[in-house]
Image (cartoon, grey):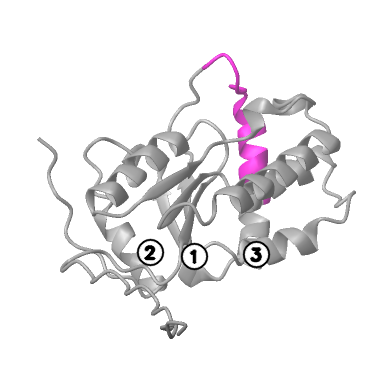
């Protein structure tokens, strides 16, 4: 006589670990501004704070350094279009790989470089895309250029160029981003002594996540 089959029961979900972080969805924070203002340093420090809180972090690096079409003052509209598209592509690829995606630049500051390269005109009609994509950042940290440009062999040390980009960003950023999602810091504040915990708490609150106090690495 054939043996009756027993319906397979679904595997039980693992019991939550007491005190473990709970992120309803992945969060995304962008560090933006012109060049030479310690964005990369801030990105690395904030990502380390995320990890010390027991959460996972993924980094989206600055794509402009890989631009095959040219950078700095001589960049064309096409070159800055490449940067914009590459920024979005990278964020799409990394968005779900960790609790928090930390990006070195966003579409907002790249849009400012693009407008400058196009003489102020939206030559390739990307503003609608930039406006929509700006809404995908849970938090944006804008660093203000109160430090001198330092030569790194790649980025321009032309103060006028940096000031021009900052002026465009001053104008377009309020039209792209709600003020409650914007944090402003002076570049000179990005030091080894800066406490990034308050920023992580604000990011976690924005997505309904729970975090625990950071542990000290020894």
Residue 58 lies, in percent from the top left, at 44, 46
Q: What kind of element bears circle 2?
A: helix
Q: What kind of element bears circle 3?
A: helix
| Residue at the (59%, 64%) spot, across then down | 136
Give the vertical position of 218 relative to 102 (above or below). above
Q: Is residue 32 left or right of residue 76?
A: left
Kindly identify which residue carries mark 2.
203
Residue 182 lies, in percent from the top left, at 48, 62
Q: Check if residue 206 falls in the magenta segment.
A: no
Q: Which residues are magenta?
A: 152-168
Q: Earlier in the sequence, mark 2 or mark 1?
A: 1
Kindly identify which residue carries mark 3.
176
Q: Residue furthest right?
A: 123
Dot 2 and dot 1 residues touching (CB under 8 Å) = yes
Kindly identify which residue carries mark 1.
138
Q: Can the viewer see residue 66 in this picture?
A: yes
**Mark seen at residue 214:** none
Dot 3 and dot 2 residues touching (CB under 8 Å) = no
Q: Residue furthest left?
A: 218
Residue 147 lies, in percent from the top left, at 43, 32
Q: Earlier in the sequence, mark 3 or mark 1?
A: 1
Q: Is residue 4 left or right of residue 106?
A: left
| Quadrant showing the C terminus | top left
Q: Determine the CA span between mark 3 and mark 2.
A: 19 Å
Q: Determine the CA span between mark 3 and mark 1.
A: 13 Å
For the residue pair 208 and 76, the one nearer the viewer reads as: 208
């Amino acid at each position: 006589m054939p043996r009756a089959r027993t319906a397979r029961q679904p595997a039980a979900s693992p019991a939550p670990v007491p005190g473990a972080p709970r992120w309803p969805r992945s969060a995304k924070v962008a560090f933006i501004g012109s060049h030479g203002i310690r964005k990369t340093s801030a990105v690395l420090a904030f990502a380390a704070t995320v990890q010390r809180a027991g959460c996972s972090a993924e980094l989206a690096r600055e794509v402009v350094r890989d631009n095959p079409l040219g950078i700095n003052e001589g960049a064309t509209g096409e070159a800055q279009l490449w940067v914009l598209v590459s920024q979005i592509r990278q964020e799409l690829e990394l968005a779900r790989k960790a609790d928090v995606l930390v990006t070195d630049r966003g579409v907002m500051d790249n849009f400012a470089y693009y407008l400058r390269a196009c003489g102020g005109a939206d030559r390739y009609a990307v503003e609608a895309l930039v406006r929509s994509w700006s809404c995908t950042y849970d938090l944006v940290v804008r660093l203000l250029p109160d430090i001198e440009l330092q030569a790194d062999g790649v980025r321009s040390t032309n103060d006028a160029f940096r000031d021009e980009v900052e002026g465009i960003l001053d104008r377009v950023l309020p039209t792209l981003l709600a003020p409650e999602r914007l944090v402003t810091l002076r570049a000179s504040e990005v030091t080894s002594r800066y406490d990034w915990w308050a920023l992580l708490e604000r990011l976690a609150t924005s997505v309904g996540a729970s975090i625990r106090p950071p542990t000290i690495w020894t």
